[in-house]
Amino acid sequence: MFAKRHAFRTPVPFRLIPLATALALAACGSPDNSALSVAVLGRSGGTSGAPFDIGESTTLAGQLLRASTTEGLVAFDEKGRVIPALADRWIVTDDGQSYIFRLRDGDWPSGEPLTAESAKKALQTALDALDGTPLARDLAGIDEIRTMAGRVVEIRLGRPMPYLLQLLAQPELGLAFKNRGAGPMRLERAGSAARLVPIDPASLGLPAVENWPQRSRRIDLRVLDGPAAVEAFNAGEVDIVMGGEIQDFPLTRSVGILRGTIQLDPVVGLFGLKVMRDKGFLADPANREALAMAIDREGLIAPFSLGGWSPTTRLVSPSLDGDLGTIGERWSEQSLDDRRAVAAARVRRWASGASGSTGERAPAPAAPAAAQPPGAAPKQATKATRGAAPAPVPPAANGPHLSIWLPAGDGSDTLFGKLAADFAAIGVHLLRSSDIEAADLRLVDDVARYPRAAWFLNRLACSDGQGLCSTEADARVKEATTATTPEERSALLTEAEAELTAANVFIPFGTPIRWSLVRGSVAGFAPNTWGWHPLMPLAWVPR
């Protein structure tokens, strides 16, 4: 009996304008028919070296390698659905607080049997390695891991976790025995590429697959920067480019209709600016709110010719499971011109008491209180670390100068230009910083691993140690972990969102943008809500 899936409302799928009707699938095979060549976008390795580390969880390449070589109790298929892995079936008790997994027959790669005890120890080791990370906070509801029989493992929860299976399928929850994972692929080095070879199930004590060598193929994985990856795709050197974000999206304009198709994932997550310090202009939540009020969110994405993108002023994507609907979009009754007029007045008030144009402020009357979401009171943020548009308002000579960090790429250049114009419209001077640690504002672009408010709030928690935060919001999230009913938990998380919104420590744009380039002949790839594309489904040879 399989656990029930919990549906949620997904964003309207992205569509390309006007490319959607022009791009066509084309059959263009890999140079080596025995392999599929995949390029993952990354900055660390470029075209030289092989920056692959199975234990690395901060890069997409590292996550793909771990998921391919060290599977967990469950895994994702190409459509983002949870499927069996080391566990071949499971049940969930009626109260939602116990998940019971029956492990598959077979062995670890060492030849030793896969047992409940060995799987329990491996799972506990994986959980311990997450200590202090946002994912550890997501998994905080796990109370105990027990062995019930030779191949049965039970995970007991202190509270229901409707998305536990999605979390257990994450690469970081892969189970290793004696520092080796059980596949489904093994890693070989091949110069600057990682060669991933599907493991014959028979070698793991599993039922044999007829004609295994003909049914499967290896995956050659390379890490390339955006221009190199798109160039390789256009030249027919790689079959798939994955891991695309907004900074490299303009490169897709070079992809011809005979080469392949651009795939966009309907993801949710955090896409906006984190406020990194509470100095000068940014010391007042009302001033930080002024920046959020000045942004034309639809205008930000207009140059990219994307339809179906969902702008939002909320920290938590709307319409997720558990959303009470009591927090709506901010400033919904004000036009962009009206919002900018309010924001510009705050800038002028600050500038009238500023000393020079360095961003530091001399004593001056308090700025107007920030507009609050329903039920929220103004809150000062806690500092965790250092940290065609309407006609612009003429900037004050001593108006604030703020710096922003964005990843390198043409898309980021476009984004910076739009943001600089939006901020100039209220008298704020925006500068681009190449030093991520020195910037006042930092782009956050992260896809949610499960669609609930807790994911968003955990990513913006004070314990993350990145930029400004709200201790009041963190307190509500902590209370929610011990809530006795789903309704109480949702209410506490809604309060946490209101507190965090009032603190104005994060300026949301909308949903993240994730894209891939896929050759028309490729099978085993599908856009999905998680933006996650495992390699093993790509290793099956199309019939």
Image (spheres, grey):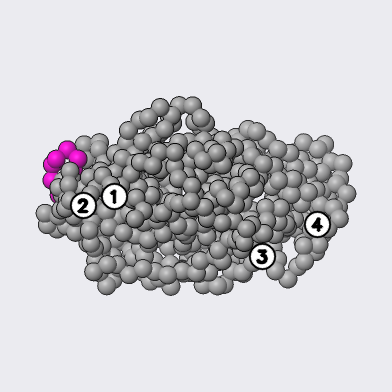
| Image coords of residue 279 (percent x, y) | 68, 41
Residue type, numbered disc 4: Ala
- Classify mark 2: helix, strand or loop: loop
Q: Which residue is mark 4?
A: 389
The range drawn in magenta is: 108-118
Q: Is residue 117 magenta?
A: yes
Q: As rendered, which of 206 and 55 lies closer to the eye?
A: 206
Q: Which residue is mark 1?
A: 215
Determine contact: label 4, label 3, CB under 8 Å.
Answer: no
| Image coords of residue 345 (percent x, y) | 82, 55
Residue type, numbered disc 1: Arg
Disc on the earlier residue, 2 or 4: 2
- Classify mark 4: helix, strand or loop: loop
Determine contact: label 2, label 1, CB under 8 Å.
Answer: yes
Q: Which residue is mark 2?
A: 209
**Residue at image point 55% right, 53% down:** 261
Left or right of 79, for residue 117? left
